[in-house]
DNA sequence: AAAAGTCAATCTGACCCG
DNA sequence: TCGGGTCAGATTGACTTT
């Protein structure tokens, strides 16, 4: 059974349901010029904002649908661009108000800054010999609860990578701060 | 460039480096009877402890190597078993001392309890019409920093699923508690 | 409407302890 | 040594704010 989210319900109650041009999930509206879902919207924004570059591990032919869209970031991003999502519509990042004292050098692909646009290669490892990185198992449970949408999903993966263009360190020292707290609690009940 | 971890350095300094029978990453020692890495060790432990069952999305032929091991949990687990990791060597879960007040019904695959062994299906969506769930993009950055290990990686995915065996709700009400706090901070420097 | 921002949820694996 | 436990770190996407 589907377990739509709050505003999905609202949207589904309407007569016209539209679908994401990238993954075919229920669309959220137009984003960066293309009718797309929340996930692809956020994904594209992050990729452009942080100038991420992914490299497919399988041959750039990964199928991107609602279930497999997270399997290959390279192919997902490629498809975002292919269907016309406009990178220029992504606004440059704003600087956070003030910085705390502690600072760590992070390896995360996601930094916040007035992006200098030096690409960050994030998922690599293909035949051409790029860096390697695992693929994933990130599985938002929301989707697990739906009994429908069974898509056959061949697919792939990728990795973020470093600078690609020639001499491209138009520096300016950058400092980023980002914090995130997470918590999880759960209980599970089972009966005979 | 490789950026080995603290004790990897130690291990690499030794004359004999051994590799994981599952993913070929540097082995950590014997786990559940098989020479394996930390990741596969932890993965297998969790899968057995929580009795997770994954379903491949592509055909059960996913290549499992250091880079792609996270792409398909179904195939990763299958390989763990295939190379001989012993499920019986995983000890039953201990009950946490005392429980807090708040309780949430979670959808996570990971629960803690004296496992009743009712399988939890976690990643599905294959041709046979199982539940669907995205695949992932979980990418431990540690690996991103290494310039080596380029593996070609076709691959797949899976999803945790519910009970598989016939009449199998040997219940007993179960209550689980689990909490996790996370925090992330980072800064990034760039120069011209 | 559609940008950006926020953060709960989830999984992985490095590390620690016995 | 190899069990299990812990939790920082990374990513996604639902939701909020601008
Ligand atoms: Zn989409
Ligand atoms: Zn791909
Ligand atoms: Zn391994
Ligand atoms: Zn598989």
Image (cartoon, coloured by chain):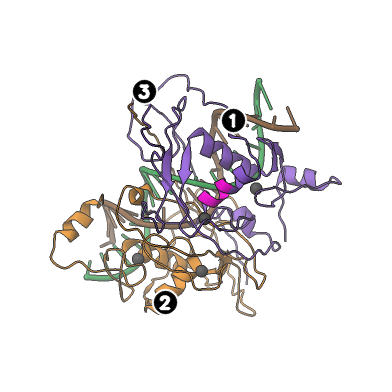
Chain colours: A orange, B purple, C green, D brown
Instruction: Confirm if mark 3 falls within 8 A of ligand 4.
Output: no
Callout 1 secondary element? helix
- To which chain does the residue with label 3 belong? B
Callout 2 secondary element? helix
Q: Earlier in the sequence, mark 3 or mark 1?
A: 1
Residue at 36% of width from left, 23% of height from top? B172
Callout 3 secondary element? loop
How busy is the neighbourhood of tag 1: few (under 14 within 10 Å), some, or many (20 plus)? few
The residue beneath circle 3 is B172
The residue beneath circle 1 is B88
Q: Residue A156 magenta-drawn?
A: no
Per the rendered image, the range of residues in magenta is B73-78
The residue beneath circle 2 is A81
Asked whether B97 or B77 is in front, the reply is B77
Quote the CA–CA distance across marks 1 and 2. Answer: 49 Å
Asked whether B105 or D10 is in front, the reply is B105
**Are dots 1 and 2 in contact, CB under 8 Å?**
no
């Amino acid at each position: 059974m589907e377990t739509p989210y709050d505003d999905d319900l609202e949207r589904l109650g309407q007569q016209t349901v539209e679908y994401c041009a990238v993954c075919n999930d229920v669309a959220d509206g137009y984003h960066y010029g293309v009718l797309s879902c929340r996930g692809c919207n956020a994904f594209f924004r992050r990729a452009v904002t942080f100038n991420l570059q992914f490299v497919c591990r399988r041959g750039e032919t990964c199928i991107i649908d609602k279930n497999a869209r997270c399997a290959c970031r390279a192919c997902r991003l490629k498809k975002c661009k292919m269907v016309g999502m406009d990178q220029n519509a992504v606004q440059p990042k704003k600087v956070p108000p003030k910085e705390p004292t502690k600072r760590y050098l992070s390896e995360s692909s996601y930094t916040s800054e007035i992006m200098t646009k030096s690409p960050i290669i994030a998922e690599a490892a293909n035949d051409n010999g790029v860096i390697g990185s695992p693929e994933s198992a990130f599985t938002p449970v929301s989707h697990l609860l739906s009994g429908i949408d069974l898509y056959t999903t061949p697919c792939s993966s990728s990795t973020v990578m470093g600078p690609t263009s020639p001499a491209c360190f138009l520096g300016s020292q950058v400092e980023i701060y980002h914090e995130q707290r997470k918590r999880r609690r759960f209980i599970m009940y089972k009966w005979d």
